[in-house]
Image (cartoon, helix red, strand yellow):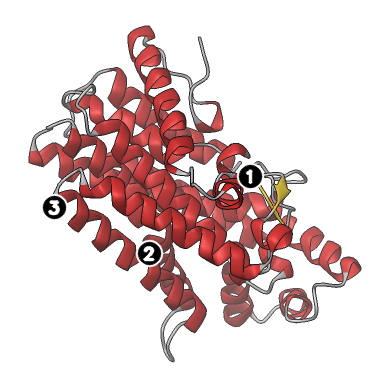
Amino acid sequence: MTVVGPFGLSVRDQALEADVQAGLTAVEEGLLEATKSEVPFITEAAQHLVRAGGKRFRPLLVMLSARFGDPYAPGVVPSAVVVELTHLATLYHDDVMDEAEVRRGVASANTRWGNSVAVLTGDFLFARASHILADLGPEAVRVQAEAFERLVTGQILETAGPQDGRDPVDHYLDVLGGKTGSLVAVSCRFGAMMSGADDTVVDVLTQYGERLGVAFQLADDVLDIASDSHESGKTPGTDLREGIATLPVLRLRERAARLGLAEDLALCELLDSDLTDDTRHAEALRLLRAHPALGQARRDTVRYAEEARAALAPLPDGPAKAALVELCDAVVHRAG
């Protein structure tokens, strides 16, 4: 049984497995072609993260969603290239905003070439994605534009923080719906759309993708705290060091405000201190790993994964649906 895609997902149908692998290979070729420029330096910068690898989670979802129509339709692979280019572009920008030094186990673009080159390279990838979209028709352009608006809105909301009186956890989940859920939903939508699937199927897969995308990011939040070696190639506790409050931290603060326990308040105070100090950072990680807030964040991850699984109920049973269900299980497994 060959492993396909992220998290060690195993496709148990040989024909589906072969088609998915062929599709992902074609996407990889498309990514390299789309990131070429007449200027060698631009090619090097644009292919930096392509060549660093990655889960190709979004292209995988395009391929699996296309199985509910004609998976060999001409728009399927290009749409998968579009969603991955868009995702890669956001990583270049995110690394600048977060001042990240490592991405996918290699030096981030901003570390290697500076912030200006990293931002402009992200813009270059957005432009190339738009060029491909133009050949996929006005509906594809509209869907991508709406998702991109949601993605940027989520980023702005994260930067601005919750308004007075807004529950921080609810605000954060809305942020994730925009930043991550929107593009994962589009991946499923494009796969179904481009394959000519029925509109009802397109809607079901879009809802599935939205919930799976949030679960996927919540699992990353848990891993960033719980893992000694982060699967994404990032250093554990990166968000913690940068002062970004992900769900485990928000659940801790929620509990501290509700119960007022001395140990919770002390940990909150530690998290509010300068965690660029390696000793403080290591202590914060150690305490969070043992705290009930991490367990609550895991349960939140499971809830979203279960909602994604439930969304698939109207679809006909078969190898593609089974693989999508297994992705829900895999996300939960990642979160421990």
Query: Given the image, on which type of amino acid does mark 3 rest?
Result: Pro
Rendering coords of residue 281 (x, y %): 82, 67
In front of the other: 265 or 113: 113
In front of the other: 64 or 334: 64
Front of the two marks 1 and 3: 3
Query: Which of the image's four quarters has the C terminus?
Result: top right
Query: Given the image, on which type of amino acid does mark 2 rest?
Result: Leu
Rendering coords of residue 150 (x, y %): 32, 66
Q: Are marks 2 and 3 in contact (CB under 8 Å)?
A: no
Rendering coords of residue 216 (x, y %): 48, 47
Q: How far is mark 1 from mark 2, CA to CA?
A: 20 Å
Q: How far is mark 1 from mark 3, CA to CA?
A: 34 Å
Report crowding for label 3: few under 14, some 14 to 19, many 20 or more residues within 10 A (C-alpha).
few
The mark that comes first in sequence, 1 or 2, is: 2
- Residue 311 in view here: no
Query: Given the image, on which type of amino acid does mark 1 rest?
Result: Ser
Front of the two marks 2 and 3: 3
- Residue 197 in view here: yes
Q: Is residue 291 left or right of residue 321?
A: right
Rendering coords of residue 288 (x, y %): 73, 61
User: What residue lies at 16% left-to-right and 26% top-to-bottom?
Assistant: 69
Q: Which residue is mark 2?
A: 151
Q: Are marks 1 and 3 in contact (CB under 8 Å)?
A: no
User: What residue lies at 19% left-to-right and 49% top-to-bottom?
Assistant: 140
Residue at the extreme bottom: 164
The mark that comes first in sequence, 1 or 3, is: 3
Q: Are marks 1 and 2 in contact (CB under 8 Å)?
A: no
User: What residue lies at 51% left-to-right and 79% top-to-bottom?
Assistant: 159
Q: Which residue is mark 1?
A: 232
Q: Which residue is mark 3?
A: 138
Q: Secondary structure at mark 1?
A: loop
